[in-house]
Every structure is written in structure tokens, then in C-alpha cells.
Amino acid sequence: MMRQRVSSIARLRRFIFSAVAVLLCGAYSLYGAYSSPRAGMRSGSVALFGASLAFGDLDLTIGASKMSEPQPMQLTVQLSRHERWTDRDPDCFVAPDDMHVTVDGQVLELSDKGGKARPMMISGVEMQLINCAPAIFRSRMNSIFEDRVESTVVVEGSGRRADARIRHLLARRQVQIEPSNQLRPGDRVTLVWTPAEDEWSGSTESTDVHIYYPNDFSVVVKPDVAPPRFIFVVPSVRPGPAKMGLNTIYLQAHPNVLACTGLNSCYAVADSPAEVEVTVAPR
């Protein structure tokens, strides 16, 4: 019962984390696009095709997530017209019928064409939080993506083409334990996030390490945070096999965007890491 409860909580937290990341990506063009480039983002270079521009007024955001093993990686690409705070009545982007988005050659399905955002009901009050909803493209349920050092996202339509190159977009985020997975209460250990090339943004306040033993205990430890390294002292827990997870609720990892061509900007977020199995030795 305890094991099922903890596993369900872990899956729920990963789901919420991924959902929040995608929502943040969707709001990116409104909240934060006008300061200096930040982690996971690269300003676009405008590509010329004949006498017409590519998609130089669009912001692209992409997120990769995996709910659990052995499910495949799921990709979500969002496209929205670059907005400014002074835009009272913006011209919302609507994906044309001939627009296509691919990741490493695989076609994503259009799930929402974008346009004017609908009001949201919050505590019984209708609120218009954003002006425009992004166009959303998602990977097919049966799509299998190969983990590769560099992935390419291509946007095509109306005779125009734009692309982004992203490092380790499809890598399953993991933490490795130094010096080993054999732990002893009082040991000072380090969780090392991989890929190490990821960039980071956000707050470290709610970052914690979750240690639990199936059907027995659950302990939360606050680490010293210096991404990609998270350092903590193993608490006093019962010896035996256990699992360990790193929760980075407000601290976001981003795949490194290497290039962004034909778009206003490209932005990427990563999923939360998989749990690791450890063995706790007697003190």
C-alpha cells in the first residue's frame, strides 16, 4: 500500500511538473521574452527565402516528457506570435492548414490551431489571463524517438521553413549518485544531473531529495543546490533497499538550444529525472 501510494505521488508530481512546464512555455512570449536571453532560450536569426521572410514573428517552445517507463518520450511544440505588453488587441497566430512540424524527421500532429484564448474560470470568476492561445503540435502516441546528441525541429508551411537545433532534447533526464548507490546514514553524497549540458533557471527553494523504502518509510531531505550537483547528508533511515528521487518544483532544467533560424525565438524545457535505486547500509 505504502509503495503504491509513494509511486502514485511521484508519478503525479512528474505529471504536474511537466504540465506546469508546458504552460510556462505557452506564456513565455508574454512573460519574460523582453529581457536578455535566458536559460533554454535562443533568439532567432531571420532566414530569407526568395523575397519572403520565414516565421520571424513566431516564438517556438518545445517540451519533452515521459510519464513513466516504458512509455515513449512525448513531445509538445507550441507556436505563438511574438507579443509585447503594449499590444492591447494582438493579432493572434492561427496555424495554417499546410503547416507541418517535425522533430528529427517525424511528423507531429496538430492538436490546437491557436487563436484567441478563451477565458478561464478561477474560483467561479471568469478571467482572461492571456490574449492568445498557442498553436500546439504533439507527437503521436506510437512515435519512437531515438536519443541523440542533437535534435532538429523543423516548421514548414506556405513555402517557408524555419528550424531549431537542440542538444539532448530527447535524453531521459537522470541523476547519478557519487560516490556510489551504497549509502550509509551520515554519508555526504552528491546527486549529479545528466545531461550536464542542461541550462537552469528558477528558484531552488522547493528543491528536495525524496528517499523511501517500499511499505515502510518516506524521508525528505533539503540538499545544497548547485546545478547540476545536489549535495546532502544521508539521514538516519532503516537499512535495506530504497528509492531516491530529486524534486525540482521551481527549478527548471532546459536543453541547450544551439540554433534558432527563421523564428523570433526558440525555447526548450526538460522533464523531471527518473528515480534511482539505492541500498542503505547500517550506520
Image: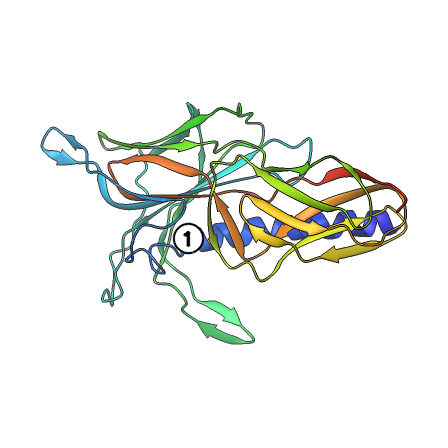
The residue nearer to you, when weighing 94 against 77, is: 77
Q: Position of residue 72 (x, y in %)?
A: 61, 31
In the rendered structure, which amino acid carries the disc numbered 1? Gly
Judging by the rendered image, the residue that carries numbered circle 1 is 26
**Where is 95 relative to 146, above or below?**
below
Count all numbered tags in the image, as a single digit. 1
Q: Is residue 159 left or right of residue 234?
A: left
SS for callout 1: helix
Q: Residue at x 22, y 38 (%)?
A: 45
Residue at position x 45%, y 35% from top?
A: 109
Give me the residue at 29% from left, 54% from top: 36
Residue occupying the point 82% across, 49% down: 185
Q: Is residue 247 above or below residue 279?
A: below
Q: Picture coordinates of residue 225 (x, y %)?
A: 58, 53
Q: Position of residue 188 (x, y in %)?
A: 71, 47
In x, y percent, where is residue 70?
68, 30
Res 258 quadrant in image: top left
Determine whether, in the image, residue 158 is placed left or right of residue 1. left
